């Protein structure tokens, strides 16, 4: 879901453990970064059980990544993909707090 204008758009996410960030692009062919979520800025990762993500296209596959500056609401392609992404992001954020 967009930052200022709350509409849903597809984005291509890349998990980068070395750079300690989750980068996102307009699509998988794009080379210019659309934005990043730094692991150290992540406060919380949770399943959107309260349905707070406005008009999610797939509410059961929606999860949120809360940072100091912004709430990112993401939709996974499947329940398994959502669980994998959430686990990876949570683990990266927790590991980063040790440094």
Image (cartoon, rainbow, N blue to C red):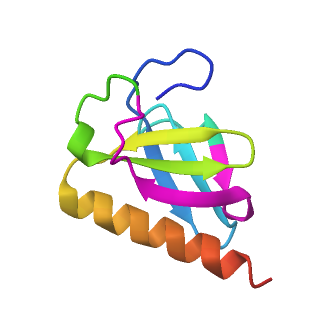
Choose top left, top right, bottom left or bottom right for residue 85. bottom left
The residue sitting at the front extreme is: 50
The residue sitting at the top extreme is: 5
Q: Which quadrant would the C terminus be assigned to in this image? A: bottom right
Q: Which of these two is toward me, 22 or 79? A: 79
Residue 63 image position (x, y, % from top left): 39, 49
- Left/right placement of residue 56 relative to residue 66 reads left
- Left/right placement of residue 85 relative to residue 79 reads right
Choose top left, top right, bottom left or bottom right for residue 43. bottom right
Residue 93 image position (x, y, % from top left): 62, 70
Q: Is residue 7 magenta?
A: no
Q: At 25% from the left edge and 28% from the top edge, which residue is drawn?
A: 57
Residue 5 image position (x, y, % from top left): 56, 14
Q: How many marks?
A: 0
Q: At 73% from the left edge and 57% from the top edge, which residue is drawn?
A: 41
- Left/right placement of residue 69 relative to residue 42 reads right
Choose top left, top right, bottom left or bottom right for residue 53. top left
- In magenta, the rendered stretch is 36-53
Task: Judge whether 61 appears above or below 33 on screen.
Answer: below
Q: Is residue 52 magenta?
A: yes
Q: At 70% from the left edge and 66% from the top edge, which residue is drawn?
A: 19
Q: Is residue 33 visible?
A: no
The residue sitting at the right extreme is: 99
Task: Judge whether 28 appears above or below 53 on screen.
Answer: below
């Amino acid at each position: 879901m967009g930052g200022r204008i709350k509409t849903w758009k597809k984005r291509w996410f890349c998990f980068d453990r070395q750079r300690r960030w989750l980068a996102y692009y307009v699509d998988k062919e794009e080379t210019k970064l659309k934005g990043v979520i730094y692991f150290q800025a992540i406060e919380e990762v949770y399943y959107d059980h309260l349905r707070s993500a406005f008009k999610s296209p797939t509410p059961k596959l929606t999860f949120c990544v809360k940072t100091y500056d912004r709430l990112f609401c993401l939709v996974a392609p499947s329940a398994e993909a959502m669980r994998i992404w959430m686990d990876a992001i949570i683990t990266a954020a927790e590991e980063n707090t040790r440094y």
